[in-house]
Image (spheres, helix red, strand yellow):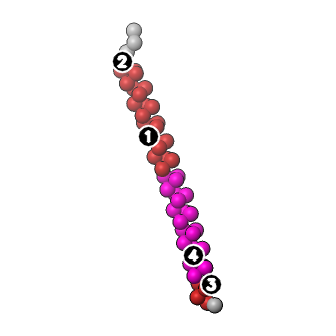
């Protein structure tokens, strides 16, 4: 006999795992975007300082 509660638990686990993967992916993406932005800002600052010295 099939218990309907088992199916609901499975769906809940699938949703939970998908949400966790999405959250981790978003966090990693945000980390790399912020790092890239900081790198770009440092390069622009160095370029600005080089031009201001000349």
**Label 4, label 3: how many angstroms apart (C-alpha)?**
10 Å
Residues at marks 1 and 3 touching, judged by CB atoms closer than 8 Å: no
Which residue is denoted by mark 3 in the rendering? 50
The outermost residue toward the bottom is: 54
Q: Which residue is drawn at 36% across and 18% down?
A: 4
Highlighted range, magenta? 27-48
**Label 4, label 2: how many angstroms apart (C-alpha)?**
60 Å
Circle 3 crowding by C-alpha within 10 Å: few under 14, some 14–19, many from 20: few
Circle 4 crowding by C-alpha within 10 Å: few under 14, some 14–19, many from 20: few
Does the magenta run of residues contain 43?
A: yes
Which residue is denoted by mark 4 in the rendering? 44
Coordinates of residue 50 in the picture (x, y in percent): 62, 84
Query: Which quadrant of the rendered structure holds the C terminus?
Result: bottom right
Coordinates of residue 26 in the picture (x, y in percent): 48, 50
Give the label, 1 or 3, closer to the camera: 3
Q: Nearer the viewer, residue 38 or 5?
A: 38
Coordinates of residue 36 in the picture (x, y in percent): 56, 63
Dot placed on the residue nearer the N-terminal end, 1 or 2: 2
User: Magenta region, mostly helix, strand or loop?
Assistant: helix
Q: Is residue 54 above or below residue 30?
A: below
Dot placed on the residue nearer the N-terminal end, 1 or 3: 1
Which residue is denoted by mark 2 in the rendering? 4
Dot placed on the residue nearer the N-terminal end, 4 or 2: 2
Does the magenta run of residues contain 17?
A: no
**Label 2, label 3: how many angstroms apart (C-alpha)?**
69 Å
Which element carries disc 2, helix, strand or loop? Answer: helix
Give the label, 4 or 1, closer to the camera: 4
Q: Which residue is drawn at 40% across and 21% down?
A: 7
């Amino acid at each position: 006999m099939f218990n309907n509660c088992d199916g609901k638990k499975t769906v809940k686990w699938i949703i939970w795992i998908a949400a966790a993967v999405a959250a981790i992916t978003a966090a990693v993406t945000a980390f790399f975007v912020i790092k890239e932005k900081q790198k770009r800002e440092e390069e622009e600052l160095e370029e600005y300082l080089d031009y201001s010295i000349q």
